[in-house]
Amino acid sequence: MWTKPWKMKEGFLIGGGLIIIGILLQILAGPVDWSCFAWPVNIIALIILLLLIGVMYALRKRVYPFEWMMHLGAAVPCIVYALSLTIVMGLCFQTETGGIPWLSRMLVFWPFVLIWTWMMLISGLAALNHLLRFKLKEIPFLLNHAGVFLAITLATLGNPDKKELTMTCYQDEVEWKASDEMGASEELDIAIELHKFIMDKYPDGTPKRFASDITVYTKGGKEVSGTVDVNKPMKVNGWKIYQYGYDVKMGAESAFSEFLLVRDRWIAGIYTGIFMMLAGALCLMLFMAPKPVKEERRDIQ
């Protein structure tokens, strides 16, 4: 073990070591504080990460672990650990309070973060390697690795900038303030005026659809009117506005609507990464599939 070339057993040991280090950090330092990476720190961190990957690639011939990270011996164990922790995340209800200690707050759980950081480095090195030795046959692999790197990195670093707020609007009143999950109020760059709450019902009287006719105002003087449904948001100034709630006691006569406002400035980059992965998988299926063997024609004598 630990003799060149390293194989998967070294990869699983490194992954296990990262989990142990993560648990120690969780105990000693507490959960990861993503607020420290809010803009502009996250863009600086992204630049540093790209430079680090470039340096690691340049030193790959001198520092063996850097070269090894571009091979299956590193990639497969990393994928196994990352998927395992992600499955645990899916099985454990994620909540800010209560739930299973550590496992119910996986996004701030150090082992989860360290393993996915390892995945960032591996995918970034692999993408750079395919880019610099570019040939047509490298396209599917370049798309796959670059897509994984983009999606993971931007989702991670962009998370502190993501906002989810709720706003309660009363009919014919303009509201500029919304609240976060802790109840803290914040004045926004948009305001919402509720014109009418809409509720459609099934024959038995249960709600079938509820929505709101609104006008959204921006501080720049822009006005956008329309109907907001639960799954059909209105998009204004980078915000997605969803119908979220209403006065349940009053039903169709509700005098107010509650809206969920979501802003994620990094989402376009994340979707780009996902589409790159899909394109890479499609290229593999189209161009890397084994070609059928042509049978020789034989004339019957």
Image (cartoon, rainbow, N blue to C red):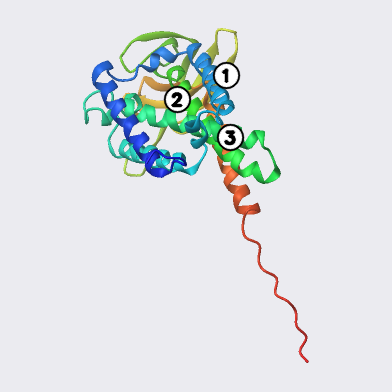
Question: Which residue is denoted by mark 1 in the rendering?
Answer: 224
Residues at marks 1 and 2, CA–CA distance in whole angstroms: 32 Å
Name the residue type under label 1.
Answer: Val
Name the residue type under label 2.
Answer: Thr
> At 67% from the left edge and 37% from the top edge, which residue is drawn?
133
Mark 3 or 2: the one toward you? 3
Expressed as whole percent of the image width and height from the top left, the position of residue 173 reads 44, 11
Instruction: Classify 10 Å Cα crowding around label 2: few (below 14), some (14-19), many (20 and above).
Output: many
Question: Which residue is denoted by mark 2 in the rendering?
Answer: 156
Depth check, front residue: 16 or 123: 16
Depth check, front residue: 159 or 228: 159
> At 47% from the left edge and 21% from the top edge, which residue is drawn?
157
Name the residue type under label 3.
Answer: Ala
The C terminus, quarter of image: bottom right
- In this rendering, the answer to whether 286 lies above or below 90 is below
Expressed as whole percent of the image width and height from the top left, the position of residue 259 reads 41, 22
Q: Secondary structure at mark 3?
A: helix
The N terminus, quarter of image: top left
Q: Earlier in the sequence, mark 1 or mark 3?
A: 3
Expressed as whole percent of the image width and height from the top left, the position of residue 227 reads 51, 27
Q: Earlier in the sequence, mark 3 or mark 2?
A: 3
Q: In the visual, does 52 lie left or right of 3?
A: right
Question: Which residue is denoted by mark 3 in the rendering?
Answer: 127
- In this rendering, the answer to whether 8 lies above or below 244 is below
- In this rendering, the answer to whether 35 lies above or below 205 is above
Residues at marks 1 and 3, CA–CA distance in whole angstroms: 42 Å
Depth check, front residue: 165 or 15: 15
Mark 1 or 2: the one toward you? 2
Q: Secondary structure at mark 1?
A: strand
Q: In the visual, does 109 lie left or right of 276?
A: left
